[in-house]
Image (spheres, rainbow, N blue to C red):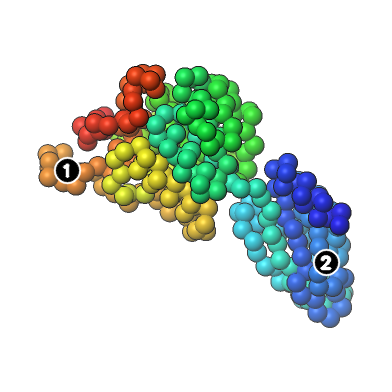
């Protein structure tokens, strides 16, 4: 009973843990099927599945599962693999117990607003960060779990970084986008994406490399963001980004930057008959439009063209 009360407490506090359950026990094993143990992210435990070398090895496996957020089975022969004298074999189910994934949207513009709606429906806890009081309002973001009206760079210290955190940069200023990307790239997260045109992404990559950020760190960043579905409006762009977030959440092959966010190529410079720009290019234009207060802009960015994206 104590163990389940602790699980409830951790889930309520947003503290990630791994529940370890003995699912198989053969021969002379220290614990029988059904024994449980909790493993915290600092490696400490509650309960035991047998102690000694096997418990130490299971804690290592649990820490690895906590990083990926994926459940796993761990099978081991106590004598042949661990050198224990018990002579039995055991199997463990490792279950990371996490809250719903958290999505932090840096930027309370039109795409950010529509993405908040879609991501909330998809099961994400959404936090919106923007220093513009007229944009980051409860009227514009009724579904947001939290609104942070502050300089996005200053707000980073209030976030809980970890394997259940998704980060999206869609601010109204290119300089702020770049500063956020530099500040976030080396942190611990499940997903980091930035909206923008191909030209913007290329410039940012060059400058970040010049500042000493390694290619393997930048390779984890999804930019441009969203699936190529020929999205035009802020709502369509938001849906394309939400689809990518869901893919990263549900598809193990899409994690840690192993699957490109988009498969697209720019149109030829003088080919006016080529297909329209991809969602990433249009998304870059959408967030690059002048930023009057919401009451003066209406509800759509509108009027996006490929010319807007060729920077």
Asked whether 135 or 212 is in front, the reply is 135
Residue 159 falls left or right of residue 185: right
Which residue carries the number 2 mark? 35
**Is residue 258 shown above or below 280?**
below
Considering the numbered disc 2 on the image, is that residue within a helix, a strand or a loop?
A: loop
Q: Position of residue 51 (x, y in %)?
A: 86, 62
Query: In the drawing, does residue 282 fall left or right of residue 59?
Result: left
Which residue is at the front of the view, 250 or 233? 233
Q: Residue at x 32, y 31 (%)?
A: 300
> Which residue is at a point 47% across and 29% down the rendered structure image?
140
Q: Residue at horizontal 78%, vertical 69%?
A: 22
Quadrant of the image containing the C terminus: top left
| Marks 1 and 2, how far apart at CA | 63 Å
- Residue bearing mark 1: 268
Q: Earlier in the sequence, mark 1 or mark 2?
A: 2
Query: Residue 248, position in %: x, y?
Result: 49, 52
Asked whether residue 65 is in view, the answer is: yes
Q: Of discs 1 and 2, which sits in the foreground?
A: 2
- Tell me the quarter of the picture where residue 202 sits: top left
């Amino acid at each position: 009973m104590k163990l389940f009360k602790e699980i409830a407490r951790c889930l309520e506090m947003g503290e990630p843990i791994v529940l370890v359950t003995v699912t198989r026990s053969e021969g002379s094993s220290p614990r029988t099927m059904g024994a449980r143990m909790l493993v915290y992210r600092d490696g400490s435990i509650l309960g035991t599945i047998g102690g000694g070398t096997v418990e130490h090895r299971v804690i290592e496996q649990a820490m690895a599962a906590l990083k990926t957020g994926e459940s796993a089975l761990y099978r081991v022969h106590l004598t042949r693999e661990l050198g224990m004298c018990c002579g039995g074999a055991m199997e463990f189910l490792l279950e990371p117990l996490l809250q719903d994934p958290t999505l932090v949207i840096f930027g309370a513009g039109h795409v950010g607003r529509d993405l908040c709606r879609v991501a909330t429906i998809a099961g994400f806890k959404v936090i919106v960060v923007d220093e513009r009081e007229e944009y980051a309002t409860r009227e514009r973001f009724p579904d947001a779990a939290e609104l942070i009206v502050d300089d996005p760079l200053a707000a980073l210290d209030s976030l809980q970084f970890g394997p259940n955190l998704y980060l999206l940069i869609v601010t109204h200023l290119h300089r702020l986008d770049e500063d956020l990307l530099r500040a976030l790239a080396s942190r611990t997260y499940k997903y980091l994406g930035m909206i923008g045109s191909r030209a913007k992404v290329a410039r940012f990559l060059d400058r970040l490399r010049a500042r000493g950020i390694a290619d393997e760190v930048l390779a984890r960043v999804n930019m441009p963001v969203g699936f190529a579905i020929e999205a035009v409006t802020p709502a369509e762009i938001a849906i394309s980004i939400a689809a990518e977030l869901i893919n990263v959440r549900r598809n193990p092959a899409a994690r840690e930057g192993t699957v490109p966010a988009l498969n697209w190529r720019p149109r030829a410079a003088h080919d006016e008959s080529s297909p329209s720009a991809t969602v990433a290019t249009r998304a870059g234009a959408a967030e690059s439009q002048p930023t009057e207060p919401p009451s003066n802009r209406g509800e759509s960015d509108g009027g996006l063209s490929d010319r807007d994206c060729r920077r």
